Image (cartoon, grey):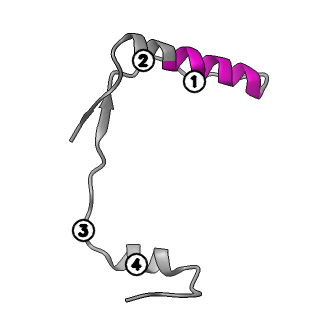
Amino acid sequence: MKIENDYKAKLKIWATELDVVTLPKAIGFPEFSCRRFSSGEDMNIWKKSMLDEIARNGGLRWTK
């Protein structure tokens, strides 16, 4: 069934669908706590350092 011009169609489909799908979990994230950044640039520098650490550790592993 094709639904057109109904912006709430996704919510209706989700509400009527009874199957619960579990999302995979990523193992291998470095430890980090809540942080506040003074700018978007500071946050991007921190994100790059986290991604570099994940890469040094061999990446993430996904489990069910």
Q: Earlier in the sequence, mark 1 or mark 2?
A: 1
Q: Give the range drawn in magenta.
A: 40-51
Q: Callout 4, which amino acid?
A: Ile
User: The N terminus lies in which quarter of the figure?
Assistant: bottom left
Taking the spot 44% from the left edge, 80% from the top edge, the residue there is 12
Taking the spot 75% from the left edge, 23% from the top edge, the residue there is 41
Q: Among all residues in the image, which is located at the extreme left?
A: 64
42 lies above or below 4:
above
Question: Residue 13: which disc?
Answer: 4
Q: Earlier in the sequence, mark 4 or mark 3?
A: 4
Q: Callout 2, which amino acid?
A: Ile
Q: Earlier in the sequence, mark 3 or mark 1?
A: 3
Task: Count residues near mark 1 (Cα–Cα under 10 Å), then give few for <14, some for 14-19, many for 20+.
Answer: few
Please indicate, yes or no, whether residue 44 appears anywhere in the rendered image: yes
Task: Count residues near mark 4 (Cα–Cα under 10 Å), then give few for <14, some for 14-19, many for 20+.
Answer: few
The x, y position of residue 11, in whole percent, is 47, 74
Question: Residue 19: which disc?
Answer: 3
Residue matched to label 2? 54
The x, y position of residue 45, in whole percent, is 66, 17
How far separated are the C-alphas under marks 4 and 2? 37 Å
Task: Count residues near mark 2 (Cα–Cα under 10 Å), then give few for <14, some for 14-19, many for 20+.
Answer: some
Q: Callout 3, which amino acid?
A: Asp
Relative depth, front residue between 5 and 21? 5
Helix, strand or loop at label 4? It is helix
Quick check: 38 left or right of 30? Answer: right
Question: Residue 34: which disc?
Answer: 1
Helix, strand or loop at label 2? It is helix
Queried whether the magenta region covers residue 64, the answer comes back as no
Q: Are dots 1 and 2 in contact, CB under 8 Å?
A: no
Q: Callout 1, which amino acid?
A: Cys
User: The C terminus lies in which quarter of the figure?
Assistant: top left
Of marks 4 and 2, the one in the foreground: 2
